[in-house]
Image (cartoon, helix red, strand yellow):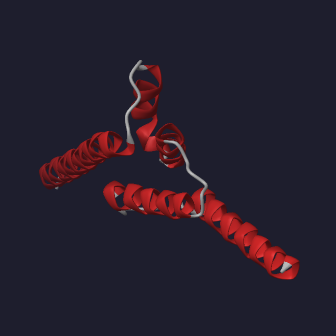
Amino acid sequence: MANVHNIYREVFVHAVFVFFMLFFLLKKRGESYIREYTMKMSNLASKLKALKLELGEDLLVYLVLISLSTHFGQFKVSYNTQKDKWSINEFTPHCVQEEESKKKDRSENTHLSLTSHNKKRKTKGALSKRNK
């Protein structure tokens, strides 16, 4: 019986190790959506809870927050300076809104950059035609 208990304990320790490694290795990469990412993190937390290792909401939000890219810097500062702390269900829509805002800003900046680049080409083309 003691042998079965030791085997169970080893399997449990390995499972917990794998879940924590996933937590720390799972990063929001590229253009993946923040909602899906927070759902994955929340799902991992619920699996840990099933193993009798409950992560508090504050810790889960913090783990998601620190794994966000540097583009979310202002959002991170804003969250850390507010008095109220959000649950993961409150936190996710705010992250999604921030992500959509960043995407919109990026597309507007790209449009402005391309527009100004095209204007420079037209101006250079007009100047070269005058000089001929």
Res 28 visible: no
Q: In this view, does 129 lie to the left or right of 105?
A: left
Q: Compared to 30, does 116 lie above or below? A: above
Report whether residue 94 is seen: yes
* Quadrant position of the N terminus in the picture: bottom right
Quadrant in which the C terminus is drawn? bottom left
Give x and y (percent) for residue 76. Answer: 45, 33
User: Residue drawn 75% across and 76% down?
Assistant: 8
Q: Which residue is drawn at 60% across and 57% down?
A: 52
Return the x and y of residue 68 as percentages of the image width and height. Answer: 48, 47
Q: How many labels does the image show?
A: 0
Q: Quadrant of residue 7?
A: bottom right
Pick the residue in front: 95 or 113.
95
Along the viewing direction, whichever of 17 and 98 lies nearer the viewer: 17
Q: Outermost residue, front direction? A: 1
> Could you say where residue 2 lies in the image, as x and y percent from the top left?
87, 76
Q: Which residue is drawn at 53% across and 57% down?
A: 49
Give coordinates of residue 26: x percent, y percent. 55, 62
Question: Furthest-right residue in view?
Answer: 2
On screen, 108 above or below 129?
A: above
- Residue at 61% across, 55% down: 53
- Horizontal relation, residue 127 to residue 110: left or right: left
Compared across the picture, whether 93 is left or right of 53 comes to left
